[in-house]
Amino acid sequence: MDDSISSTFAALADPTRRAILARLALGETSVTKLAEPFEMSMPAVSKHLRVLERAGLITRGREAQWRPCKLKAEPLREAAGWLEEYRQFWEQSFDRLDEYLQRLQAEAKQKHASEPKGTQSNNKEKVHARDNQ
């Protein structure tokens, strides 16, 4: 996986990493603070942070004893743009399907309305008789 979008999606595949990004969306914070809500060791949290850093989703710094982490939004923007293309495709597909279904319903209503009155009730009786068998 050498392209950035693949790295982004691979990093986002883990719920812990998504939770870390959600926390960083609120602002820069330390590794220790990021680790607090998780029931895992600091080395495990550090592994998650390395994956996020390699994907370009965060930056980690070092200021004396404080090791701040900061969200980098550009890879998320690229992934959102890629997904947007497919969202448009699916919306257009659903719109075409909706138009087709509406046309079928209108044709069925028109066909039903054009049947002679006796035929309509006779058809209902046939359906009722068939359902009761």
Image: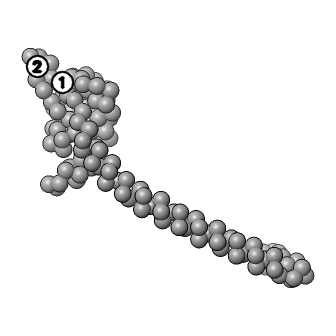
Apparent side of residue 44 relative to residue 102 in the rendered image (left or right): left
Residue at screen point 24% across, 33% down: 71
> To which quarter of the image does residue 124 belong?
bottom right
Q: Residue 63: give its label.
A: 2
Q: Residue furthest left?
A: 64
| Marks 1 & 2, CB-CB < 8 Å contact | yes
What is the basis of the colouring in this image?
one colour
Secondary structure of the residue carrying numbered label 1:
strand
Viewer can see residue 41: no
Q: Which residue is mark 1?
A: 68
* Relative vertical location of residue 116 with respect to residue 55 in this rendering, above or below: below
Q: Residue 28: give its label.
A: none
* Relative vertical location of residue 17 with respect to residue 103 in this rendering, above or below: above
> To which quarter of the image does residue 60 belong?
top left
Front residue of this view, candidates 11 and 39: 11
- Lower sequence index among marks 1 and 2: 2
Front residue of this view, candidates 122 and 133: 122
Residue at screen point 21% across, 32% down: 45
Q: Position of residue 56 (x, y in %)?
A: 18, 41
Residue at screen point 36% across, 57% down: 85
Q: Position of residue 88 (x, y in %)?
A: 42, 58
Q: Position of residue 1 (x, y in %)?
A: 16, 55
Q: Amino acid at mark 1?
A: Pro
Q: Amino acid at mark 2?
A: Glu
> To which quarter of the image does residue 15 belong?
top left
Which quarter shows the C terminus? bottom right
Q: Position of residue 31 (x, y in %)?
A: 20, 25
Viewer can see residue 109: yes
